[in-house]
Every structure is written in structure tokens, then in C-alpha cells.
């Protein structure tokens, strides 16, 4: 009962791809077991699982809108625009990094501390809840 409808869907998608893109498409699964094991290893061994209290940092230059995000989960250092009280907010700026960070899965609450590189301002801590949709980031 399931095979016939699946084959019909596959054939439809294959024909649409050939018509629109010009190339064929295979639906055969080569080795799902290896992929599933690799996914489970990633989920169980990601940095946020091993160090759930890790804190990422935003280091900014006071009086400018330039900063660097130092990710505690993947080790990346990424330039970002820093508007401590404006739009986009620091929470939204770091959210863009964590949506593609290989050290998190996307259901964590990430802690980030902001530091003035000159040391004249006190560090502040913010959290980013990756469970909520990105468009609602600044609402939480």
C-alpha cells in the first residue's frame, strides 16, 4: 500500500527536476545506518553537551559599532556590528552565528558576555534561547 504511492511521488519529483533543472535525481538510500550513527555521535558529543555552562564573548571597542564574537562552542571568532541598545540587538547578532554553529544543535540556551576591550565598562551577560524562532529573539 505504501510502495506504489511513494514510487509515484518519486517519479513525479524526478520528472519535475528533469524539466526544471535538467538533471536526474536518485531516491536510493545508500547507507542510512552510517548517517544515523554519525548524527547520534554529533548530538551526544557536541561542545554544548560537554560544557553546557560555557560562555561565549562579545569583545567590542567602546564608542564604535565594531565587535568580535568568540564562540565557546566551535572556537570561531566572527566580526559583528555591535549596537548595545539598538537594532539589531547583540542577542540577534549572535543568533545568526549559533544558527550555523556546529558546536550546538539549536535547542540550547546560550550565555554570552559582552566585554569592552579597554576595560572601562562592566561586562554584561545576555542569553540567547535557541528554542524560540529567530524572528522572536528580541522579544524574549
Image (spheres, rainbow, N blue to C red):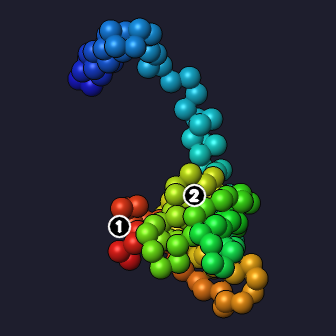
Quarter of the figure with the N terminus: top left
Q: Could you say where residue 30 lies in the image, as x and y percent from the top left?
A: 56, 23
Residue 48 or residue 100, whichever sits in front: 100
Tell which circle, 2 or 1, labels the residue nearer the N-terminal end. 2
Q: Secondary structure at mark 1?
A: helix
Residue shown at the point (62%, 35%) measured from the top left: 34
Q: Residue 32 vs residue 76: left or right? A: left
Eyeballing the image, is 4 above or below 99? Answer: above
Number of numbered discs visible in the structure rendering: 2
Which quarter of the figure has residue 48?
bottom right
Q: Residue furthest right?
A: 118
Residue 137 or residue 11, whichever sits in front: 137
Q: Residue 83 vs residue 132: left or right? A: right
Residue shown at the point (41%, 8%) measured from the top left: 22
Q: Could you say where residue 68 lies in the image, as x and y percent from the top left?
A: 68, 65
Within 10 Å of the Cα at label 2, are there few (<14), some (14-19), or many (20+) other Cα atoms?
A: some
Within 10 Å of the Cα at label 1, are there few (<14), some (14-19), or many (20+) other Cα atoms?
A: few
Quarter of the figure with the C terminus: bottom left
**One can see residue 96 in this view:** yes
Q: Could you say where residue 59 lies in the image, as x and y percent from the top left?
A: 69, 73
Residue 58 or residue 27, whichever sits in front: 58
* Label 2 close to label 1 by CB (< 8 Å): no
Q: CA distance from mark 2 to mark 1?
A: 16 Å
Q: Secondary structure at mark 2?
A: helix
Q: Could you say where residue 55 lies in the image, as x and y percent from the top left?
A: 66, 75
- Tag 2 residue: 97
- Tag 1 residue: 136
Residue shown at the point (59%, 37%) measured from the top left: 35
Residue shown at the point (57%, 41%) measured from the top left: 36
Amino acid at each position: 500500500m505504501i510502495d506504489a504511492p511513494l514510487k509515484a511521488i518519486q517519479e513525479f519529483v524526478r520528472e519535475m527536476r528533469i524539466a526544471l533543472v535538467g538533471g536526474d535525481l536518485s531516491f536510493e538510500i545508500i547507507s542510512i545506518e552510517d548517517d544515523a550513527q554519525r548524527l547520534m555521535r554529533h548530538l551526544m558529543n557536541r561542545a554544548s553537551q560537554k560544557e553546557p555552562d560555557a560562555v561565549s564573548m562579545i569583545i567590542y571597542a567602546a564608542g564604535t559599532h565594531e565587535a568580535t564574537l568568540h564562540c565557546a562552542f566551535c572556537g570561531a571568532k566572527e566580526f559583528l556590528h555591535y549596537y548595545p541598545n539598538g537594532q539589531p540587538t547583540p542577542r540577534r547578532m549572535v543568533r545568526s552565528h549559533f544558527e550555523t554553529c556546529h558546536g550546538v544543535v539549536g535547542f540550547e540556551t546560550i550565555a554570552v558576555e559582552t566585554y569592552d576591550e579597554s576595560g572601562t565598562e562592566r561586562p554584561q551577560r545576555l542569553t540567547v534561547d535557541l528554542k524560540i524562532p529567530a524572528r522572536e529573539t528580541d522579544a524574549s
